[in-house]
Amino acid sequence: MAILEEPIKELKILKNYINGEWVESQGELKDVVNPATGKTLAKVPISTKDELNKAVEVAKEAYPSWRRTTPLTRARCLFRLKELMEENFEKLSRIQTIEHGKTIDESRGETRRGIENVEVATGIPSLMMGYNLEDIATGIDEYMIRQPIGVFGLICPFNFPFMVPLWFAPYAVATGNCIVMKPSSEVPLTQLKVAELAEEAGIPPGVWNVVNGGRTVVSSLLDNPDIKGICFVGSTPTGKNVVYKKCGETGKKVIAGCGAKNCLVIMPDAILDKTIAGLMTSIYGNAGQRCLAGTNIIIVGEDEAFYKKFRDAFVEKASKIRVGYGLDESVQMGPVRDKTKKERIVSYIEKGIKEGAKLTLDGRRVNIIGNYPDTCFLGPTLFEEVNPDMAIAQEEIFGPVATFMRAKTLDKAIDIIHNIPFGNSAGIFTQSGKWAREFQYETECGNIGINIGIAAPMAFFPFSGMKDSFFGNLHPQGQEIIRFFTESKVVIQRWL
Amino acid sequence: MKLNTTSAVVSFAKDLEENSTKFYENLIQKFPQDKETFLAFIKENKKNVVLVQRVYYEVISDAIEGCFSFEDLDTDTYTFDTKLPKDLSYPDVLLKAIKIEEKIQKYYLDSAEMSKSLMADIPRVFEGIAKRREKRKVELESLK
């Protein structure tokens, strides 16, 4: 198939977007590299503490006026942003593919998911409403109103450069807050394009700011007393030990979406061909770099014939996955984000072998469609005979690696899930409502899939998470994010 | 060539519609007597492209099996040439048109069948277009 045209042709020196202006940073520059071709796409600044603090300052200045802007007017800005995103749908998607590596289908899917969050946020005049009750005592009424809080910091991950920031940003500004966003320095291009669209949509200067950078920007956001809350998505060590801890110390509101190790349970009555398609997307989609990716596949029952049939169908489908550049429409799996990440995944494959698991599919040997350097590519990998205590079954690999485990009963499968420190997502494939209900009821995970490979909540539901996968009280998206970005104020009134 | 991803399936649908348009444009040049019918087909082809692309861009989501809902749809099965040899009579051209419509219809039905339980809205639109193709075949038969 023909390769789709790349959306960016010339190397760019990226700027920060502060107070409605594109500002050059004094920080050092880092290459943004297309993981499939190895081509440098842009140079991103690693901004300084002063630059971050300046962005927070202007956001704080913009806040009183933005807060007083009516919810309807704020919603209209978001309606315009949504329309601009639709107009730029293909460009936004292709940018994701070139900077992240995901396939064009995956990028377009991500774009759609991100836009859905803007769509939901446009309903802010209704979403932000409080409630009231007359005569809580005779002649006395009580009501609750939601008020914005101030400036929020957004610390975004590399794996969903478009969608994850939009779990937060549209809701934050819709509720009357201002934001300072730090996109991942590995994939900054998408959010800088979004900032251009936010500007075009008429979101006033200072309301939506983007500061590129690394650890300095993160720690400055956490330290800055004018930042009232932090939205973070990233690894568990950083989320738990740095972001959550620091926000607790400084009294900031916090959402910290973290790592995962998701299990998919295959019951003996699962419809095999549809299950396998779901598993391919879940395990190998986005090259496994997804916090909802299924990685541990637990096959329930002692029926060897079923296991063999399932295994053979899985191996056949996985070994045929076309790996290559995501702008080639025939490609089903792109590269992982960079060389370091590939090396980390390879080290887990080696660990699995050492631990005694059987390497059925070895992704280290990969057939790449097209003439691209193999720097970041990996093929689908499968381990069989995996023990639930092995590192490959317990730790987040964040790559296209699946493990097969066996469990005699559904209860035993749920035990395996509960012995993993994470609780982001789990799924069951079955035709039995009884098993499905039992699984949904018992499993301690935030997002449950029933015959769904990726249990990704829609924008009007919270993106949940438990155990080491989430730190905070309220989750991204839906009603919960409105509560996160607002304070509930209660008024009790009596007219004498 | 084998098609496996939704993006490839949608692009190929667009190619088929555009080639169908080319074919009817050639046909009108050579046999203008039923021009209105073929112009209506051309208009419908354009509408089909819009329908297919719209449903794709609206339904595609990070969470569904975009790269894995189709398996080895072979483009050779559905490809057709749009040329009209000089010595071809009008009835022969109509026969060729029917065969083209059959191929396109088969493409939409095969891909709808393959993705039915996974992609939801896309097979529904594909089946709708396939149904209209059936009507076209009847219309072409009536012109013979």
Image: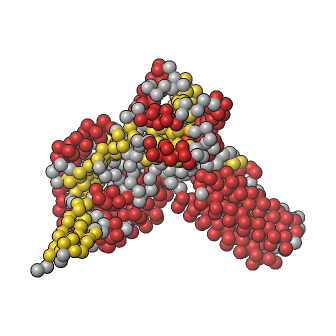
- Please say if A404 is above or below A270: above
Q: Position of residue B119 (x, y in %)?
A: 59, 55
Q: Position of residue A349 (x, y in %)?
A: 48, 26
Locate the C terminus of chain A and report the quarter of the image it occupies.
bottom left
Q: Nearer the viewer, residue A411 or A326?
A: A411
Q: Is residue A260 above or below residue A51?
A: above
Left or right side of B52 for B23: right
Q: Residue furthest left?
A: A496
Q: Is residue A283 left or right of residue B50?
A: left
**Would you say residue A424 is visible in this rendering?**
yes
Q: What residue is shown at x 55% (from left), y 27% (from top)?
A: A384
Along the viewing direction, whichever of B68 and A44 lies nearer the viewer: B68
- Residue placed at 20% from the left, 54% from the top? A228
Q: Looking at the image, which residue is at 41% across and 59% down?
A: A460
Q: Position of residue B16 (x, y in %)?
A: 69, 59
Residue drawn at x 34%, y 44% is A470
**Residue A207: percent from the left, percent from the top?**
26, 62
| Left/right of residue B71 with respect to residue A428 in the rendered view | right
**Is A290 on the left or on the right of A76, as rendered?**
right
**Toward the viewer: B128 or A31?**
B128
Relative to B142, is A99 above or below?
above
Q: Is residue A35 visible?
A: no
**Residue found at the far front of this picture:** A138
Closer to the camera in the image, A7 or B128? B128
